[in-house]
Amino acid sequence: MNRQCSHSLWLRLGPGAIIASLTIGSGELIFSTRAGALFGPKIVWFFCLVCLLKWVLLYTTGRQMILRGIHPMESWTRLPGPRGWLPMSFLLLGIPCFPIWVAFHANTTASLLPGGFVMGWHAGMLWPYLLLLLCAVLSIAGQYKWLEKVQLLLVSLLLGIAMVALFLVSPQFMDWGRLAIPWGDWVYPEWIESYPSFTQRPVWVELSTYVGIIGGSSYDYLCYVSFLREKGWGRAGFDAWETNPRGAVLRAKVSPQVSASDMADAMTSLRWDTCMSFVSVFFFSAVFVILGHEILAPMGQVPVDGQLLSMQAYFVSDQWPVMRKVFQVGAFAAMLGTLYGTLEVGPRIFVEAARAMGWQRWTAKRHQSHKKWVLAIAVGSMLVVASTQWAADSGKTFSFIWLLTPANLFTGVFGCGVVLWATLWMAFRPPEGMSGFLARCWKWLMAPAGLIFLLLGIKGYLDFGGGGALLILAGSFGVGMAWARWVDRRQGLL
């Protein structure tokens, strides 16, 4: 086992810090502010529930990886139906979702950079492409660990500035404690009529967007489990399945021997790492909810397309222009880290799906596969950015939030329910079958958490696009099943 699991709790922090940093830019900085301006204190309890449910997801999937050494996508090849239909469905749905997410982060990050003209081109149009190119080069060069440390330092600085702004605002916390109880209906404030983009956006679609973005997406958590391979916690660094040449699972290998103390160390590290990740996410969210409610709501303003990060400058008083500049630098660092992290998550998910299906060509040379997927996602994101710029230049109404919503409803809401229920199904099957009182407790937590995500996802799709949206989602899983069956038959002929 990797001896990074030392007796110091702070040294146990691992990939959870990366997961937290993935969502701070878009989730807490943008959408927590937006939620605070729209719904006020009661949204804090909503975020608390979301963080709790997602912590259950992250911890239970990581727990299985540590105890059995089996990535969820590898386990999913044993679900009823065509072998590997669920990994194939996630791979299929990830192909459009990742470029949309990365393009959104690139566009939002670019909005913080100066405009003007460069060699006849408007800088605002060039910045997204340059940022995507920079992050792709860094990802291929393997400089992620260095950038992560710098990003976390600057994000910590941003949080410190936000706390200073919170102190200057001096909210009445006793009133907040009373008002934060989520009584009453969820409705937009009256002043929202000045924002036409909300007239056709149902409230539960907006709330579902927060569910998907706050704390990360199902793909982020599947990537977290992949990071555990590198940490070597428990049995996470071992290949637990035996397969035949076509990639089909034959049986589980004998679990490698890991000492009881090492396993206890690994479980303690997992608990501490995941808890600290979501505590920081919730704390950051609560701070920006308060700032959004106390500062933007009285002004009748809310972050929307084109102004997703500009209004946060109001959080720092005009009497402190230097602090406002520092705040903007911190916001840029947070968004750049989110952009870079999302570009890192995609290739790992695709490689895990290939590993689960036994595609040796994609897994034998892992670094080469990583490069190909990074380039593919970067090019796809550039095409999304180009199409949005073309729509804007043509005078057509375009909303990046609208484009992001269906992707977010799957990756961050419905997909979380699917991962939880698939993990729960595998927990009842040997050799992963969990036994004991604590294992039964986790099963009882996973079932309702997964159901809540599934119902919220269905509600969001119905409100967003009606039955047609659900048919497209179901059709995507159907295509995934057909693709998996075709792959399985083709491998059987080899």
Image (spheres, grey):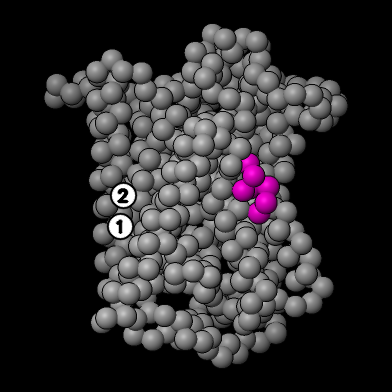
Query: Residue drawn at (45%, 55%), measured in percent from left and top?
Result: 477
Tell me where residue 335 sits by quadrant: top left
**Where is residue 285 drawn, in percent x and y?**
64, 36
Query: Residue drawn at (43%, 56%), measured in percent from left and top?
Result: 478
Residue located beneath label 2 in the image: 377
Which SS type dominates the magenta stretch?
Answer: helix
**Where is residue 384 drawn, in percent x and y?**
30, 36
Residue extending furthest toward the left: 119
Nearest the viewer among 397 and 80 is 80
Whether tag 2 and tag 1 are in contact, CB under 8 A, the answer is: yes
Q: Label 2 vs label 1: CA separation?
A: 6 Å
Residue located beneath label 1 in the image: 373
Which span is picked out in magenta?
450-456
Task: Judge left or right: residue 12 versus residue 183.
Answer: left
Question: Is residue 480 one of those drawn in magenta?
Answer: no
Quadrant that contains the C terminus: bottom left
